[in-house]
Image (tube, rainbow, N blue to C red):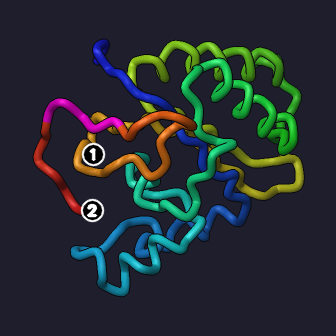
Amino acid sequence: MTNWDGHWHGYGPWVGERRELGKESHRRPGASPDDEQTQAFLTSTLPPMMTGWALLRRRQTVADRTWTAVSDAVDWLTKTYADRPPSFAPSSLYPTPEEQLQSKVRDAEEHLPLGTDTVWAYYATNGAYVSYEVICCPSHFHPDIPCPLPPSGGKPRVAKSHTPAGRR
């Protein structure tokens, strides 16, 4: 996946109890745009089962979390991480919190330009589960989903290739 051309949208953070993620009907669209499940999905703030489906949530897509530079998207991820730090048990067996953050940043800087979505999810210091993501637009895996909000001054980009659409 090296010839991707697009921009990025940030979604979240979602903060809640991990068991809430079991409400899959709120994490996936239904069979048609007007059905009850799709409407529940579109208004839900739970992270979607498939990251690209976040692009269907137009009302949750905002200009200040739409980027054309990877560095801006990674800055948002890093700031969100700092605002809601993960819980770490001291151990010599695992990387330090700083090392984990550096690894996450390196991965995002490497994968976002290739069109690979980035999700950061973990337990926060207060015990809540935190999840937020940067979604590539257009999506490799959901090329039929149009851009919910083009970057300022830009036109929506659509994928050049088509893969069979799954559920929307």
Q: Is residue 43 above or below residue 139?
A: below
Where disc 1 sits, the SS reads loop
Residue range corresponding to the magenta coloring:
157-161
Where does the N terminus fall, quadrant-wise? top left
For badge 1, the amino acid type reads His
Residue closer to the observer: 8 or 130: 8
CA gap between label 2 and label 1 equals 9 Å
Residue 46: % across, % down? 57, 64
Q: Is residue 103 above or below residue 125?
A: above
Q: Which residue lies at the image location 69% right of the left edge and 42% below the top edge?
A: 64
Q: Which residue lies at the image location 45% right of the left edge and 72% below the top edge?
A: 41
The residue wearing badge 2 is: 168
Residue 161 image-quadrant placement: top left
Outermost residue toward the front? 153
**For residue 142, which numbered disc appears in the image?**
1
For badge 2, the amino acid type reads Arg
Residue closer to the observer: 94 or 139: 139
Residue 6: % across, % down? 40, 27
Q: Which residue lies at the image location 43% right of the left edge and 70% below the top edge?
A: 24
Residue closer to the observer: 5 or 12: 5
- Residue contact at pointers 2 and 1, CB within 8 angstroms: yes
Q: Is residue 164 above or below residue 14?
A: above
Where disc 2 sits, the SS reads loop
